[in-house]
Image (cartoon, coloured by chain):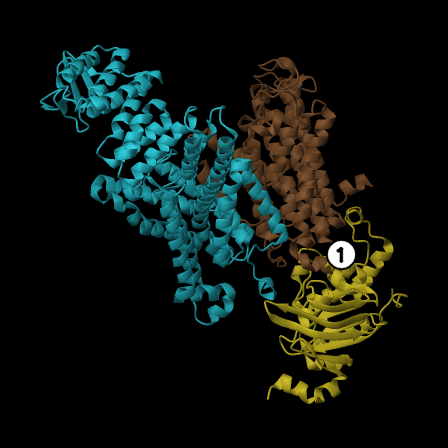
Chain colours: A brown, B yellow, C cyan
Amino acid sequence: MITRFLLSNMDRRGFVFLALIAAIGLLVPLANLLLPAGSPFHVSTATMSLWGKYLCYALLAISLDLVWGYCGILSLGHGAFFALGGYAMGMYLMRQIGSRGVYGNPVLPDFMVFLNWGELPWYWYGFSSFPFAMLMVLVVPGLLAFVFGWFAFRSRVTGVYLSIITQALTYALLLAFFRNDMGFGGNNGLTDFKDILGFNVQAQGTRAALFAMTCVMLISGFLIARGIVSSKLGKVVIAIRDAESRTRFLGYRVDRFKLFVFTVSACMAGVAGALYVPQVGIINPSEFAPANSIETVIWVAVGGRGSLVGAALGAVVVNWAKTVFTSGFMAPYWLFALGALFVFVTLFMPKGILGTAQGWWESRKRPAPVPAPEPAPAE
Amino acid sequence: MNAPTPGALTSSLLYLDGVSVSFDGFKAIRGLSLTIEPGEMRAIIGPNGAGKTTMMDIITGKTRPDEGTVMFGGSVDLTRLDEAAIANLGIGRKFQKPTVFDFHTIEDNILLALKSKRSVLKTLFWQTESQQQKRIDEILGIIKLADKRERLAGSLSHGQKQWLEIGMLLAQDPKLLLVDEPAAGMTDGETAQTAVLLKEIARDHSVIVVEHDMGFIRELGVKVTVLHEGSVLAEGPLDQVSANERVVEVYLGR
Amino acid sequence: MRILSSLLRTLALAMTLALMPALAFAQQAAEDAFARLSADSFSDTARAIDILVQSAHPNAAVIIEALADGRLLAGGGAVAVKTKEGGFLDARTGQALAAQPAGASPVRLNNNVRRVIQGALGGLGLINPDPGKRVAAAEAVFRARDVSVLPVLEAAIAKETNDRARRALREAQAAILIAKTDAPPFDRIAAVDVLRERGDQDALATLRALPGDASPGLREAQARAISEIEGKLALWRAGQNLWYGLSLGSVLLLAAIGLAITFGVMGVINMAHGEMVMLGAYTTFIVQEVIRSRFPGLFDWSLAIAIPAAFIVAGAVGIAIERGVIRFLYGRPLETLLATWGISLILQQAVRTAFGPTNREVGAPAFMSGAFELGGLAITWNRLWIIVFAALVFAALLAILKLTPMGLQMRAVTQNRRMASAMGIRTGRIDALTFGLGSGVAGLAGVALSQIDNVSPNLGQSYIIDSFMVVVFGGVGNLWGTLISAMSLGVANKLLEPYAGAVLGKIALLVFIILFIQKRPRGLFALKGRAVEA
């Protein structure tokens, strides 16, 4: 049943995407590990980590697209779920440092020693175990999304109001994680990681494995999201996006469907965050910044919301552009470009790169197309 | 629940008594009482602002009445339930403006409406059984959209959307159907066909039709209730009602 | 302390001596003092102060004050006072000198010397002809609480004619008596009463310092007085927090009220609203720069000039945004949100490129600086003016919406666009003007915020979320709701702060609003019924 759930209704674009990610996930680490540095096909560890980061963002974008593109919930707080997953991973990595920290305390991370804390806070218990930490990567963002969604969807907070309170949520978490008293390293966050599962995080082999793992999770995330949106539940969710009260009068409990999709999406964002942290080597409160979450929205919009491949594509394209832009003489103008991108996409490319390209392709194949319905307002 | 249960307060399918609701001091419904028997088809007419849409909102759980009783099937208090629960009890609603799911195919629109378990998990792992597929095909035939089943609903004409919505109500298989101005914006031919469709539906469902079009109502040939300023002004066969002096006064003014 | 007491004792002596014709003695003593001042030794300096006071030297006050300020110069046989205006006086005669005496350098101070100076000034001040100085001296004695000054104090009280000075002197006396174990018990209890009436933080500290010997009666009086003062102080503190809250509330109101128009009246989510505030602040900065360099005399008018300028600049940018972007997105609120966010990034970067990323200094005109006390409240002028300004802006906006033809057309377009259009209202023009008005008001907020916050490209970012919270909490489309919401959030924030700390207090409020919206999705003062659904 599960295989059928995951693979039914797979279109050609989906297969191309899966094949591409699988190939990248296999070839890039090999090219990094096996080819000599002089080879034209060698991929440097830095490049691999950079692309690993993009692929984490792609997973985050898919998770956001699931709620925004398909269910019409514009979450401006998805960065919070990403960051919480990242913190769960970061806590595991901190506990792995053991007595190799600056203060050499076998139990307490350095920042706690620095703050004169006597013992580990209760919510750090268990994070020395990898399986437990991975469970938390899913549970913490999922639980927050569930509780938040439970209240918000039941009381039918929709549209911009929902967007504004999701933004308030991540803003509140930003403020909270900045506090030293919270026990998450305050301003500096968690960093100076040493080992993951006994392997050195800095080592080339570990980096390659993390990259491959990111591809595996991206594929899994894509398959799960794909399975959800092409099931009947997916049809219900799209129905909710386009005509919420009609769906309700058909007897569907709209709040539960929204809650399901929102929670699944938050877990997915958490996984993306957890993969991101060991590859960039740090997690700090700035990941909660509302601006980050809004930037994620623009990735999805650029790629084409309502298309999972589009969302992933948008994340990679925008972030690649950002890297290119900010590493050259154009660096001071990146925000101009990003800002212009927001305006341009909303005004001229409401369907994103993929939707626009598809429309163009179809109009070439069929000179007189059947008029497609207008894109629904995003509310 | 077709037959009144032992604890039933009434044998009527739908029973409204003394219902009132007001918005910001304006009484949209005042002391409205109405009963619909199982299998009955009823037309509701009334000038603008008579409270027709608000009455539908109350029955389907969109609006909570300030006071009064709304019972379904004799024993279920509708004022305590939300829209989804009421829909699942077997009350279907067709809106004034046709609302279908523009981005779904016509077939998927029917599938979404098809009577079935509505839970999250059931829909996630949904498989359409052959019997259900047969029912979908049947309905597509009734609403004359079988050949367009793969088209997106958003690309249909206004009249076709109305039929699709009626088809969705058929698929929902409700005990009671609320239909809001089904003939609005239709050509004469479409209107006649719609009347035929509704009469067919009324054979095994209770139906409430709200309509302005007197010709259409005459075609249906059923009992008529006239609403005015939120309460019932007259009730009876169309000829009798349209001869009622007060009704004439309300409709034509002095 | 011992030095001070001996000093004050000799001071008492000096007052009696001063009545006798003992000029020669005084002359000699003064010479000794001046020699000591030149010796550049802390103990000699302290002794010299002592002698000057004892001998009641006519220039003693001037000399000791100069010493305290580091304006006393000594060396090369001369002792001179550098006046505050920059001239020089001979310390011996008080006559003006042409120039700084050669070889004279400022007399150095250490903490011990400073203490002696303070006591001396207190003692000298009690018999100063200026009542204000006498009050200040009494305050000094109150804090020093030295028993030895008591006789002087009592003599001064007997002579005192000024009510305020007498009260200050009595309080000083009470502060000494309460700690004086051999004073008559009745006097000590009366002293407690005097302190209780004074009722401030200093009185409380003095009462708490009651020595352990106190009789039960005295203890009881002390406990009663302490609890009474504490109650009163708590009340003042609450009042002060309320004031801070109102001040924060008026800032929130200013930042949010423009949003209440664009979001509340037009339904447009303008994420660049904060940047309109920022543009207002930068306009103020530019206006001040121009005034500083061209018309320095007009500096006190700079804010008054900046107000219309900021309104026009922010309003014009707002109209440009509405005509250029937002009008294509009506009916698609989430897309509007994204596009205006993009605009906010562009505006921030534009300002950063033009003015640099660092904070810009916006000065305060004279009437905005300083503070005054009202009972137990410390009130700064800039906060007071901002509250007044917020109230004026609010009233003006209300008047525009309710009383002008433009306001009528705005409301018409909001309620039924097509009908308004059919009646000949040019809806596009009204949309642009409404958006311009909202943005212009944000610019006005920028003028006010330039006085209390850093003027930097990020200024707007720090207010945008708060502004949205205010509007959403207050209920959309209702200016009064925005007012009440801003004030209650401001006050709640400041009342929470002492208990939870600034950050936790803010988090608590955010969580509260998130929960509140669940309960009332359309805010505190929301419209009901079918009109909302349309």
In the picture, measured across the screen, residue A198 lies left or right of residue A335, that is: right
Q: Quadrant of the N terminus of chain A?
A: top right
Q: In the rendered image, which residue does mark 1 sit on?
A: B112
Q: Residue furthest left?
A: C98
Q: Amino acid at mark 1?
A: Leu
Instruction: Say whether residue A40 is left or right of residue A22.
Output: left
> In the figure, B88 relative to C130: above or below?
below
Foreground of the two, C358 or C117: C117
Image mark 1: chain: B
A122 w.r.t. C239: above or below: above
Report the front residue among C156 and A280: C156
State which quadrant residue B176 falls in: bottom right
Residue C181 in the image: state x and y as whole percent: 43, 24
- Helix, strand or loop at disc 1? helix
Q: Position of residue A33 (x, y in %)?
A: 64, 18
Q: Is residue C176 left or right of residue B53?
A: left
- The residue carrying pointer 1 sits among few (fewer than 14), some (14 to 19) or many (20 or more) residues within 10 Å by Cα, namely many
Out of A32 and B93, give the one closest to the viewer: B93
How far from the left and from the top, in percent, is residue C242?
Answer: 47, 45
Quarter-wise, where is residue B112 in the image? bottom right
- Residue B147 % position (x, y): 75, 62
